[in-house]
Structures are given as structure tokens and as C-alpha cells.
Image: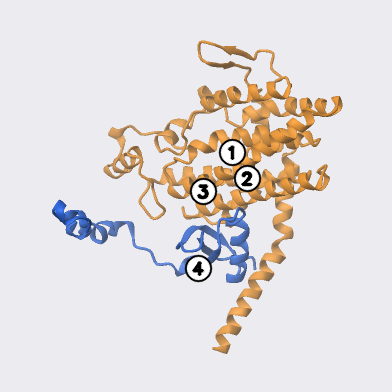
Chain colours: A orange, B blue
Amino acid sequence: MYAQLVKSEGSKSREEMTPQELAFQERIDRGEKIEPKEWMPEGYRKTLIRQMGQHAHSEIVGQLPEGNWITRAPTLERKAILLAKVQDEAGHGLYLYSAAETLGVTRDELMEKLHSGNMKYSSIFNYPTLTWADMGAVGWLVDGAAIMNQVPLQRTSYGPYSRAMIRICKEESFHQRQGYDIMMKMCAGSPEQKAMAQDALNRFWYPALMMFGPSDKDSVHSAQSMAWKIKMNTNDELRQKFVDQTVPQAKYLGLTVPDDNLVWNEEKGGYDFSEPDWSEFFAVIAGNGPCNAERLGARIKAWDDGAWFRDGLMAHAEKAASRRIAAE
Amino acid sequence: MSSEWPLWEIFIRGQHGLNHRHVGSLHAPDAEMAIRNARDVYTRRNEGVSIWVVPSNSISASSPSDKGPLFEPANSKVYRHPTFFDIPEEIGHM
Ligand SMILES: [Fe+2]
Ligand SMILES: [Fe+2]
Ligand SMILES: [Fe+2]
């Protein structure tokens, strides 16, 4: 989801594992946490770096669509709330980058891979935020979908990742609630405001469903990641849960989910619904979404424009340290 | 030049009377900035009353392979726990 297409390794049967790999798998099966300096299969380490990196990048790039509305929030209170929400996302990115760094990759390396396009971020952030109602839809649907994925990841096998997820989950429910609160206000407002809310739902519904990644039948990398407890649920399981949770919330708002096939299925105890257009999903992931160039461009510009500042503070710190040594 | 800011480990005292506890790490050019960044990253919701920052490379850690020699000896010394001793009921609380 925030990590939608993480390349993993082919899974091994117990017979194919070396004694060391088997002992490792058994630790995970017992629910033990793996900590940074401990032995781990190279594939576990690499998959985690990819997944946590992609997750971190999503938090950071995810600030942009909402940052877009900070200066135009309708009231000072809404502005303060949105600012706090976007600041949280910066924090989420930082928790995850430092958790990834415990695996022997540097943050600069991760940044470089984002900027060169070698690492991805969630497809959802390549859609534009056109109206204030989009701030409602993003908090409600996008953070809602993120929560669905992040809550089970609190139990992931890698200690630093699990602890980062616990911190993040504590903060996410504020994000979803502030979004839903915006939607409630808009839906109780003028017909024009309600129409804006409906339009935001129309535009964000399918991209939100895409956040969980391709359908299980096309999701080739799941088995090994699930055995390692890096991935806790399949894409379709989480997507189903999200739809079941969200449809009643849309009803409460008096909004219509843009899906003619949406119908309650008594037998499975969940909704039947239309899949998103997967060709659109793959196009966005490949870099051809409505805002890919703008988002990545903004990140690269921020990085490049900030270089003199990072270097300046470092130079100051080094000078101050050598002055201290000289004085001693 | 572009050298990466060093890594700091962050310890926060959650409430008066409690120990500082490790909460995570962050990059900063020096200790003063590390404290400022730690405030923004780790205490946005009243999580702390005091912050310690320590350069990550100043921390020496026991190695996972020493787990046995370091911690196993304690397993056989059950007499270090008060429950090892049976004290007669009539003695009362001890
Ligand atoms: Fe987040
Ligand atoms: Fe988020
Ligand atoms: Fe969020």
C-alpha cells in the first residue's frame, strides 16, 4: 500500500533452507522480534530496506498534496490542524528512515534512490488535490487506507520497523478524523459544498483502492514476505476490509460511492465492489500519473535547494567543535 | 562537500520520576540541533519533560552472539529471587 509493489525473494521450503535460515524462520514463527545486529538472510534485509524505504518516501512525498492547501485553508483553525497533520507525516518519514538505517543503508542513499526513480512511493500521491474537499477525502480515505495497512504492521518481525509503526499508528487516527470532520462539514453545508465533497470522493475512491496494491492473483511477491512477517495480510484482504469499513461512512455523509456494482454480499459478510483500473495503476507507478513529475520535481528541488543549508550547519558544527578542542 | 549529518540516539524522560528511555534516532549537525530536532520529531504530543541526545557512534553495544555468556548465568541463580525461599505462614509478610 504505502509499499505497493515491493520486490521480494522467491520463498523457500523448509527443506531448502540452511540450518541458519531455518532457525531464523523459527524465531519469526514463534513471534520473536529480529533486532538490527542479529543474523538475518540477505533477502530479508533487502526486502525490508525496499519496503521501509518506499514507506518512508510515501510519508514524505505525501506531504505535498496536502501542503498544497495549507496557505488556503478556510479558517485559521483548519490551517493549524492541516499544518500539524502534514508535520506528523514528516515525522513518520523520519521514524521510518532511521528504522531503515539500522539495516546498513544511509538516509542519503535512500534519498538518492528516490530522486533517481530507483525507489517508488505510493501511487496515491500522484493525484492532484483540486479543492478544499480533497483535504477531507485524503484524510478520510488515504489515511484510512494507510491505517488499515499499518495497524497489522505493528506486529511485523523486524523490531525497529514494528516500533516505528506503533508510533505512527498512535498519530494516524487524528489524521483520518480531521479528514472525516472536513467531509461532515462540507456535506452539511451548501449544495455546492456537498457537490465538492461528492466530487472529491469520486476522484479519490479508486486511487484509494489502488493503495493496497494489485489483486492477490497478480501479486507475485507476497508469499516470502508473509512468511517473514514483513507483510501481514494480502492486498485483497485489506482492500475488502477498507471497503466494508468505508461504505457506511460514505452513507452517513449522504455521499454515493462511485461504483454501480457495489452491493452487500450476505454470504461473505462484505461488499462486492468493482476493482480499480489496474492499467491506470501500473501507468502511475511507472511514472505516468497526473502529478508524478511535479511531485518528484518538488522533492528534488527541496533537496538541491537545501544543500547549502545542510552544508553550512555542518561546517558551523565542525568549526565550533575544533574551537572547543583548541580552548581545552 | 555534502557530507551527511551524523546520527544521534534520542532518549526521552516521559514524566518526572521516570528514566530516560530510548525512542529512536535522527540526523543533526550538532548536539544543540539534535535536541531541537528531537523536540519536533519525538515530543509533538507532550511525550516528554527532558531530552538526552547521544552520538550513535559513541554507543557500545553487547553483541547478539554474546547473549549466552552474558545472560544465561542468571538463569541458574534462582536463589536471587525472594520466591526461592519458603517462609512459614505464621511469620507473616517478609
Ligand atoms: Fe503517515
Ligand atoms: Fe500518511
Ligand atoms: Fe497520516
Any atom of ligand 1 within 8 Å of the CB at mark 2? yes
Q: Can you give x and y, in whole percent of width and height, for residue B45 in the image?
A: 60, 53
Return the disc, 3 or 2, that comes first in the chain's sequence.
2
In the rendered view of the protein, which quadrant contains the C terminus of chain A? Answer: bottom right
Residue B54: mark: 4
**Residue B39: x percent and y percent?**
61, 61
| Parent chain of label 4 | B
Q: Amino acid at mark 2?
A: Glu
**Amino acid type of the residue tagged 4 in the rendering:** Val
Q: Which residue is mark 3?
A: A164
What secondary structure is found at the residue carrying circle 3?
A: helix
Q: Which type of secondary structure does the marked residue at label 4 adopt?
A: strand
User: Which residue: 51% across, 60% down?
Assistant: B15
Q: Amino acid at mark 3?
A: Ala
The residue labelled by disc 2 is A59
| Mark 3 neighbour density, 10 Å: few (under 14) some (14–19) many (20 or more) | many
Looking at the rendered structure, whether the residues under marks 1 and 2 are on a common chain is answered as yes
